Every structure is written in C-alpha cells, then in structure tokens.
Image (tube, helix red, strand yellow):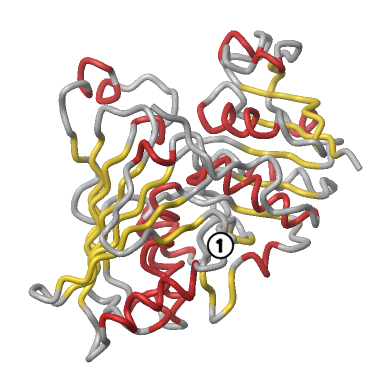
C-alpha cells in the first residue's frame, strides 16, 4: 500500500529533513507541501538539495490543503500546530514535529510556552523506557504522534536507563549540550547569523529557562515511575559553529551502592537490542561527526568514582534522530511497517 503524505512547514529545516527521508521511503507518496510566507514558490527554491521533489510547489498551509491525505506531518513552530490538528480529525495519521502535543502537564505548558494547551499525543521516541516497556509499544497503531524536541530526546535517552534501574539519582542531573543552530529553525535572528556564531560558543536559555526542560522531566519521570517533581535537572545548551548536531554531556550521582557492573548493565540492557540507539564500548565516546545524516544516537558511558557520578555523552543529528528521523521511525511503527524503513544507521563522513 502507498500512503499519501502532506508536509507543512516544508520550506524549513525540519520540514526539509522530513521530506529528504520520505523521498526514499517505498511506501510513501509525497503529494503536498505547504508553507506560509513562501507559498506559491517552487519547493526546490528553498530546498535545493531535494532534486527528486523539484516538481512540487509550496501551497498555503490551511486545513483544507492538508486534509484528504493518509498522513500529515506538521513541522511548525510551537503554538501553531494546534489550529490545524483540531481540524484534521478525519486524517488517519497526524505527526506533529512541534511542541504542541508533547507535554502532559498544562502547568508546565503554561510556565514554559504559554498559549492554548492541547491534549498530549503518543511521544515519538520508540526506544525510551516507560514503566518497564519501550515507548514503541505506545506507538504501534497510534493515530496521533508528537515528535520529540531534539535536545529533550537526547538527554532523555542518555539518562532513562540509569533512572529506570535506580542506579543514578535523578534529583541532581546536570546536562550541558553543544548544539548546532539548525535546531533553532530557519527564521532570521541576529544571534544565529554566521558572523555571530563562527569562531564562538554561545550559551542560551541559561538558568532553567529552556523549553525542553519539562519534556525531559516528563520522560524521565515516566521511565522511573516517579513524579516529575522528583526529577531535578540543570540544563545548559550552547550554540557552536556546526550546522547540525548535538553533543550532550549529562552527569548524575551514583545511587546507593550501585556497582560499576550494575551501572553499565542498565544501559546495556536498555539498548543492547536497539538499532538506532547504541552504547559504545567502555572507554569510547561519540562525536557529532559520527552521526551526521544518520538516525542514530551514539552513547558513551563513564563512571567517575572520585566525584561519585555517572557521565553520559550522547551524539545525535538534531534534524534526523532528534526530529525527522524520530518522526518517520514512529510513523513506521504506527503503520505496521518495518521500523527502520527509509532510515539509516550510517552517517556521512568526512
């Protein structure tokens, strides 16, 4: 069976990456692409690398344009998806790459986003531990999926095994992330200009203000079965001069008398059979270059007995495993297709 697809926000980075991956999917027909200010222009004017889709023209993003497809992807800024999802009740599968349907707590939404709160959907991180099972079980046959925030899913995948196994203390997590500016979208902002970024590392959303914090706390609480109030995280992202990628370094205290073997076993047991989340051999740590263009999250684990903390270093491509790849992996599960279809573990080098 071939599924017809519409992609909104198709002129942006996330929308473009969704289209790049879908273009090689044998079960998908990309029928419609939409935008706002760029409507009426050829798709390749904004995504010149998508040569196989040169025949498509960006249409206005309206409920009427998006309706009538088997699958709709919404790659819109936070606060904009809800107006369309409410009108797409007859669409068999809707996948939101924005934030509108990620959070279960309205208080958290009000505190970090504001505006209308929308019902939470199945969270699109298949490998994430949730109460002793994997999130993929909630994605099978799902009709509505919330793709993750790239920083949030990276940190959550980094720490969920240790939290679930009780070998780290989730009340004192520190995460510092080196991130590429493509995660901030394509809109013109002074702090994202090349002249501001090249040759510099720039922290932002410092001091507990980043909007992915409640998403991380929600995911880790689900992994542990505890309340989100018990998850405390100091989260600091830093923009660095690479177009794509996240390198997340997260640390947490060792819980109780957990041994080195028990600590490492928590991650080995969680990800030993996974295709797209891989724990590296002891003493090895990933680089963002190793995951460029791939749907993989590579994890390195260190046990620092002097500081009594576990350090987890995780690399992802923010546009693939962080966003578009996670969305398509979740789509495959929802449709009953092979989970890895149209997704690769192989990066691009050099």
Quadrant, the C terminus: top left
Q: Which residue is found at the position 76% from the left and 11% from the top?
A: 55
Identify the residue position indicated by label 1 in the image.
Answer: 274
What is the count of numbered marks? 1
**For residue 52, above or below residue 166:** above
Quadrant, the N terminus: top right
Position of residue 119 in the picture relative to residue 175 (left or right): right
> Could you say which is closer to the camera, residue 96 or residue 51?
51
Q: Quadrant of residue 160?
A: bottom left
Considering the numbered disc 1 on the image, is that residue within a helix, a strand or a loop? loop
> Could you say which is closer to the camera, residue 235 or residue 22?
22
* Residue 13 in the image, given as x and y percentages of width and height: 51, 28
Q: Which residue is found at the position 62% from the left and 34% from the top?
A: 18
> Could you say which is closer to the camera, residue 247 or residue 290?
290
* Residue 133 in the image, given as x and y percentages of width and height: 59, 77
* Residue 157 in the image, given as x and y percentages of width and height: 43, 61
Position of residue 306 in the picture relative to residue 127 (left or right): left
* Residue 30 in the image, given as x and y percentages of width and height: 77, 28
Residue sitting farthest toward the left: 306
**For residue 260, above or below residue 135:** below
Q: Which residue is found at the position 78% from the left and 61% from the top?
A: 141
Q: Which residue is found at the position 23% from the left and 90% from the top?
A: 256
- Give the crowd class for mark 1: few <14, some 14-19, many >=20 residues within 10 Å: few
């Amino acid at each position: 069976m071939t599924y017809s697809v519409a992609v909104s926000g198709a002129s942006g980075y996330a929308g473009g990456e969704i289209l790049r991956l879908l273009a090689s999917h044998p079960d998908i027909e990309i029928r419609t692409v939409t935008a706002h200010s760029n409507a009426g222009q050829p798709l390749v004017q904004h995504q010149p690398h998508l040569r196989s889709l040169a025949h498509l023209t960006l249409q206005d993003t309206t409920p009427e344009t998006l309706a009538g497809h088997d699958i709709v992807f919404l790659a819109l800024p936070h606060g904009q998806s809800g107006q369309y999802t409410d009108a797409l009740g007859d669409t068999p599968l809707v996948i939101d790459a924005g934030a509108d349907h990620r959070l279960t707590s309205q208080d958290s939404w009000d505190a970090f986003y504001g505006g209308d709160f929308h019902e939470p959907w199945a969270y699109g991180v298949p490998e994430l531990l949730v109460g002793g099972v994997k999130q993929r079980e909630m994605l099978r046959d799902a009709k509505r999926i919330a793709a993750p925030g790239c920083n949030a899913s990276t940190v959550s995948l980094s720490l969920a095994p240790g939290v679930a196994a009780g070998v780290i203390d989730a009340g004192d997590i520190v995460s510092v992330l080196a991130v590429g500016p493509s995660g901030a979208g394509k809109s013109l902002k002074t702090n994202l200009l090349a002249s501001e970024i090249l040759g510099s590392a720039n922290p932002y959303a410092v001091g507990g203000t980043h909007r992915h914090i409640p998403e991380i706390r929600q995911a880790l609480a689900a992994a542990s079965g505890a309340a989100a109030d018990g998850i405390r995280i100091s989260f600091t992202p830093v923009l660095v001069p690479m177009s794509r990628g996240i390198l997340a370094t997260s640390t947490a205290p060792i819980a109780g008398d957990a041994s080195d073997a028990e600590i490492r076993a928590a991650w080995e047991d969680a990800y030993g059979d996974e295709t797209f989340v891989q724990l590296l051999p002891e003493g090895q740590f990933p680089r963002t270059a190793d995951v460029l263009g791939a749907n993989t999250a590579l994890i390195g684990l260190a046990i620092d007995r002097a500081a009594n903390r576990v350090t987890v270093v995780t690399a992802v491509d923010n546009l693939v495993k962080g966003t578009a790849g996670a969305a398509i992996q979740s789509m495959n599960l929802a449709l009953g297709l092979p989970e890895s279809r149209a997704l690769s573990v192989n990066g691009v080098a050099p």
